[in-house]
Structures are given as C-alpha cells and as structure tokens.
C-alpha cells in the first residue's frame, strides 16, 4: 500500500504542499514539513535523521521524519503527518505499522519511541491501539512520550 520515499526533486514540492486541517494547525500538533526537512538537513552529518515522503502509488499522502539513536538503541518517529485530504483512510495506522516493521526487523534498536502533543487524541489512540505504552509527559514540549517494545 504505502512506501517511504527519499525526499528528492520529484516529490519535494508535493511534500511541502501537504497540509493538516486548520484545527490541527491551530492546535500546533506538528511542525510544518519545511521545518522537518530543515531539521534533517541540520543533523545530516550525524547520519541519523531521515525524512521521507509517504507515497501511495503516485500520490504523496504524508510525511515522516525518523531519528535513530544507535547509542541508546532507540528508533524514534520524530514527526509524522498525513495530508488532510487523506486523513481517516488508514494512512496514519499504515505509516506507524510500517515503522514498527522496520523496528522489529532491525536488531540495532530495543525501543521504538513516538510522541504526540497533548490534545491530539487521534494519535494517542492510534499509538495505544498498536501496543505503545506511555512513558512520560514532557511538560516542556507538551507531549506524551510513548514506547513500543517487541
């Protein structure tokens, strides 16, 4: 169904044009994709932050930013979004499940981390339903930090 594609000249503009709903934007559930791509560029020399377009066929339906911490043996979903036109169609679940498959097939990691902003109960419910457990509430970032272990 979906695949993670490197950001390149063919999909870059499509990734930048992805939008969340006005309500999600107002609640600051996720940073703009241009910020996420800039963050990945900033950390490029460490070689542990990976931005991907989420594609379904020819359509770019979302974006994900993954962060690997080899020392801590952690893989983190740093940012994830599904375009407002594709929400409610199972893409969020498919994205997280794909990352879970990557995590489970890579013995470099002991824990998969995801978080969600307080108030984004859709993401919280999704993570809970997939077996993530809350580890802490990060007051500084207003985020619930969730862990998954296989």
Image (cartoon, rainbow, N blue to C red):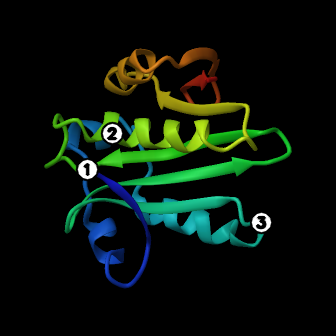
| Residue toward you, 109 or 72 | 109
Tell me if 120 is positioned left or right of 84 in this view.
right
Q: Residues within 10 Å of mark 2 (few under 14, many from 20)?
A: some
Tell me which numbered mark, 3 or 2, is placed earlier along the sequence: 3
The residue under the point 43% across, 42% down is: 98
In the current view of this chain or complex, which residue is farthest to the bottom?
9
Q: Nearer the viewer, mark 3 or mark 1?
A: 1
The residue under the point 21% across, 63% down is: 57
Point out which mark residue 46 bears: 3
Could you say where residue 137 lies in the image, as x and y percent from the top left? 61, 18
- Give the answer, above or below, for where 95 lies relative to 57: above
The residue under the point 42% across, 35% down is: 97
Q: Nearer the viewer, mark 1 or mark 2?
A: 1
Could you say where residue 28 lies in the image, as x and y percent from the top left? 39, 40
Q: Nearer the viewer, mark 3 or mark 2?
A: 2
1 and 2 marks in contact (CB < 8 Å): yes
Q: Which residue is mark 1?
A: 1
Q: Quadrant of the C terminus?
A: top right
Between the residue at mark 3 and the residue at mark 2, the CA separation in whole angstroms equals 28 Å
| Residue toward you, 36 or 73 | 73
3 and 1 marks in contact (CB < 8 Å): no
Q: Residues within 10 Å of mark 1 (few under 14, many from 20)?
A: few
Could you say where residue 135 lies in the image, as x and y percent from the top left? 65, 16
Mark 1 secondary-structure assignment: loop
Could you say where residue 33 lies in the image, as x and y percent from the top left? 41, 60
Between the residue at mark 1 and the residue at mark 2, the CA separation in whole angstroms equals 8 Å
Q: Kindly indicate the quadrant of the structure image that contains residue 72.
A: top right
Tell me which numbered mark, 1 or 2, is placed earlier along the sequence: 1
Between the residue at mark 3 and the residue at mark 1, the CA separation in whole angstroms equals 31 Å
| Residue toward you, 18 or 147 | 147
Mark 2 secondary-structure assignment: helix
Point out which mark residue 94 bears: 2
């Amino acid at each position: 169904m979906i695949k993670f594609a490197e950001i390149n000249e063919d999909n870059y503009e499509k990734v930048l044009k992805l939008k969340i709903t006005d309500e999600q934007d107002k609640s600051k559930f996720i940073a703009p994709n241009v910020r996420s791509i800039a963050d990945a560029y900033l950390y490029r020399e460490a070689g542990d932050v990976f931005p991907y377009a989420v594609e379904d066929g020819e359509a770019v339906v979302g974006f994900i930013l993954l962060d690997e911490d080899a020392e801590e043996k952690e893989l983190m979903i740093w940012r994830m979004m599904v375009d407002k036109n594709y929400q409610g169609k199972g893409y969020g679940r498919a994205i997280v499940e794909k990352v879970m498959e990557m995590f489970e097939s890579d013995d470099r990691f002991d824990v998969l981390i995801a978080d969600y902003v307080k108030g984004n109960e859709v993401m919280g419910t999704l993570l809970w339903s997939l077996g993530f457990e809350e580890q802490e509430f990060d007051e500084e970032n207003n985020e619930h930090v969730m862990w998954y272990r296989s």
